[in-house]
């Protein structure tokens, strides 16, 4: 399998949201990357060892649904990821896991 998807939603009650940002909460990038890491563990049974690059393009709001898509490349230890909310790209990048 060269591609894997993982749907997720960060609850509006998540404890980190009131501080990011007060009155107008956004899901922090670290929580999005945590969902990417969960998808990797489900797909390849591997832990994330390094985020090679990550670009956050659009915000994810609490209680919005999003989808992580992981895709394999030539290097078996590297995986590309994209996170979408519907048709909107939220984040993309590349990560690494152990062999």
Image (cartoon, rainbow, N blue to C red):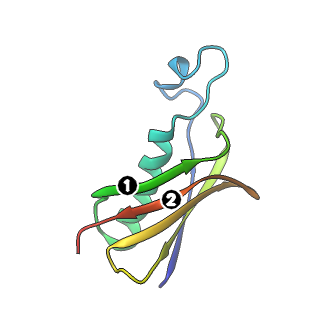
Is the residue 38 above or below the residue 25 in the image?
below
Q: Nearer the viewer, residue 26 or 14?
A: 26
Quickly name the residue at label 1. Answer: 51
Residue at position x 44%, y 40% from top? Answer: 30
Residue at position x 50%, y 46% from top? Answer: 32
Residue 43 at x, y percent in the picture = 41, 71
Residue 14 at x, y percent in the picture = 50, 29
Q: Which of 99 and 54 is in front in this view?
A: 54
Quickly name the residue at label 2. Answer: 93
Query: In the drawing, does residue 44 fall left or right of residue 94?
Result: left
Residue 6 at x, y percent in the picture = 53, 62
Q: Mark 2 Cα within 10 Å, few/some/many (few <14, many 20+)?
A: some
Is the residue 25 above or below the residue 91 in the image?
above
Residues at discs 1 and 2 in contact (Cβ within 8 Å): yes
User: SS for tag 2?
Assistant: strand
Q: Based on the displayed image, in which of its 4 quarters is residue 73 positioned?
A: bottom left
The C terminus: image quadrant: bottom left
């Amino acid at each position: 399998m060269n591609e894997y998807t993982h749907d997720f939603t960060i609850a509006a009650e998540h404890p980190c949201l009131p501080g990011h940002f007060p009155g107008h909460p956004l899901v922090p990038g670290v929580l999005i990357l945590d969902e990417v890491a969960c998808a990797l563990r489900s797909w390849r049974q591997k832990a994330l060892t390094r985020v090679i690059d990550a670009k956050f393009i659009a915000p994810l709001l609490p209680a919005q649904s999003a989808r992580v898509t992981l895709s394999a490349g030539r290097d078996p230890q590297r995986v590309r990821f994209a996170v979408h909310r519907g048709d909107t790209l939220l984040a993309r990048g590349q990560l690494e896991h152990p062999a």
